[in-house]
Amino acid sequence: MNQRRGQFTGVVCANIPLCREHFKLVMEVRGFPPTKAGQFVQLLCRSTRDLDYVERELEWPSPQRPEVENVDLIAPTALLRRPFSLAGATTDGETATIEVIHRVVGVGTDWLVQLRTGDEVGILGPLGNTFSHPVENQIAILVGGGVGIPPMLYLASELVGKKVIAFCGATTRDLLSLTVTADARTPGIDSIEPLYNIQEFAAHGIPAVISTDDGSYGFRGFVTQSLQEYLDRFRIRGEMAVIYTCGPEVMMKRVADLARARQIPCQVAVERAMACGMGTCQSCCIRVKKPDASAVPLPGQDWCYRLACTDGPVFAGEELLW
């Protein structure tokens, strides 16, 4: 758990559309602590001014409609903060620039997409633990799907100079939150050849294999299918590689199963809805194996609950009970 977390105000530098539903939000934050790949932040998806409530008596002459001022009573709003994986972070003196990638799915992310340069965002963080880097001569295989791609981008920036391959998937090309380079050749629908065709990874010298469910770009099928074919074709086993993954739970479970069958270490950044991000609300429980069944909690059981926010979000794949 990060002990230097705090509440900060971020100033929007950019809010860039990446595809049909994904946007990259770039913010400058003064005094923000150092971060690493795997960590996340909780964003207040509403104006901080909305929290300055002034109590007053409400005059309600029946049967007329009451005149209300509280924004929560006027229209749907995001009452709770929303968790977002860090897609990148840099520090220049006292000011950090942090990036998150969000997909518009409800009132909270709809508020985020309206942000413009100079707007302010309430930030809680940095939160959670981090990925462990591969040892020497290990191939790092990054597997991201949908909104699970952002932590893979941050991790890629930390692994410059190492052996790395990225596998990313989306339902269709116009939901792929990555930039296809203009001069890159188009991969075939059954190709698992890693190409330098994705700007965000190519900038770090990392090739990528892109999958779309409908075959509109890259490998036709799930990202787990292209990963499996790659592992089998090149006989990747044991300590030759380490797999990192984040995305839909069914995808991460399949990635962890593929890794386990080949005895490849796997680090999974789980995603859970959470109200606080600090272990208070206990809403982001996840089941994990216990190395000692007699130990607390739940003595006598070979499993227990952990919290995605403070014990994670990064867990070893073999520990998770999906």
Image (tube, rainbow, N blue to C red):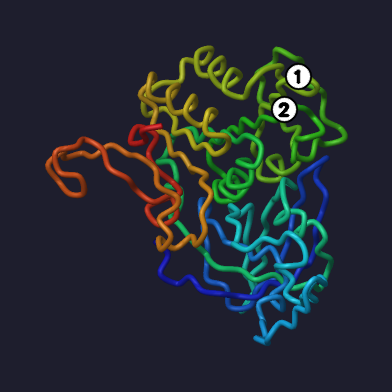
What is the secondary structure assignment of the residue under circle 2? Answer: loop
Q: Residue at x 56, y 74 (%)?
A: 7
Q: Position of residue 189 (x, y in %)?
A: 75, 14
Q: Residue at x 70, y 15 (%)?
A: 191
Name the residue type under label 2: Thr
Q: Quadrant of residue 110?
A: bottom right
Residue 49: mark = none
Q: Residue at x 80, y 76 (%)?
A: 67
Q: CA distance from mark 2 to mark 1?
A: 7 Å
Farthest residue in the front direction? 63
Discs 2, 1 touching: Cβ within 8 Å: yes
Q: Nearer the viewer, residue 322 or 199?
A: 322
Horizontal relation, residue 155 to residue 50: left or right: left
Give the vertical position of 296 relative to 36 (above or below): above
Q: Position of residue 220 (x, y in %)?
A: 71, 16
Which comes before the other along the chain, label 2 or label 1? 2
Give the vertical position of 59 relative to 275 (above or below): below
Horizontal relation, residue 189 to residue 143: left or right: right
Identify residue for label 2: 171
Quadrant placement of the N terminus: bottom left
Name the residue type under label 1: Asp
Q: Residue at x 80, y 35 (%)?
A: 180
Horizontal relation, residue 155 to residue 196: left or right: left
Instruction: Check disc 2: other Cα within 10 Å, few if <14, some if 14-19, many if 20+.
Output: many
Q: Nearer the viewer, residue 226 or 277?
A: 277
Identify residue for label 1: 214
